[in-house]
Image (spheres, rainbow, N blue to C red):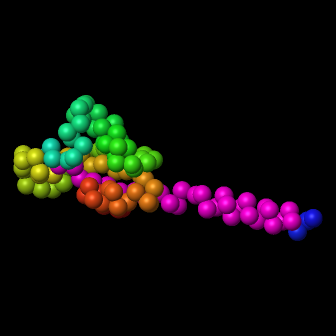
Amino acid sequence: MNTFRIFIFTLLVLAFNACTSDDLITMEYQMTQCADPWMADDGYFSDKEGTLRFFLGKKGVDVKSLSVTENCPDAAVCTACICPGCDLATVKINGEDEAILKELGFRRI
C-alpha cells in the first residue's frame, strides 16, 4: 500500500510541475505613429492597452499581462503613419501564441 501512495504522490508532483509558468513568453512591439492594425479600433488613443488587449483577444491570443510604455527610439523625426512612435507594447503570452504575434511584428525578448 505504501508503494501505491508513493506512486500517486509522484504522479501528482509531475502533473503540477508540468503546469508552471515556464510556458509563458514575453514579446514586445515598437508601435508606429498610426499604422498598427489595432489602431483602427474605436477608443485607441484613450485606452491603448485596452484596445490592444481586445484586438489580441479577437485574434485568439490569451494575454497574461500587457503594458504600453513610452519608449522613443533614437530615430529621425518622422510624422508619417508608418514611422516608429514613442509607445512600446510588452506582452506576456502562452508560447503557443508566439506565431500570431510574430505575424503582427512583435519580437520575443
Q: Per the image, is 18 magenta?
A: yes
Identity of the residue drawn at 43% across and 48% down: 62
User: Looking at the picture, how far across and down is residue 25, in whole percent?
Assistant: 43, 59
Residue at 38 percent of width and 60 percent of height: 98
Rendered image quadrant of residue 97: bottom left
Q: Does the stretch in magenta take in 9?
A: yes
Left or right? Give the position of 79 relative to 52.
Answer: left
Between residues 28 and 76, which one lies in front from this camera angle?
Answer: 28
The quadrant in which residue 4 appears is: bottom right
Residue 77 versus residue 44 in the image, above or below:
below
What's the magenta region?
A: 4-32
Residue 96 at what x, y percent from top left? Answer: 44, 60
Q: Residue 21 sits in which quadrant?
A: bottom right
Which part of the image, by quadrant, shows the C terminus? bottom left
| Count of marks, rendered view | 0
Q: Quadrant for the N terminus, please.
A: bottom right
Can you say whether 6 is above or below 80 in the image? below
* Viewer can see residue 67: no
Most frequent secondary structure within the magenta stretch: helix
Residue 52 in percent (x, y) is at 31, 42
Residue depicted at 42% across the width and 47% down the height = 63
Residue under the point 34% across and 39% down: 54
**Residue 53 seen anywhere in this rendered image of the structure:** yes
Looking at this rendering, what residue extends furthest in the bottom direction?
3
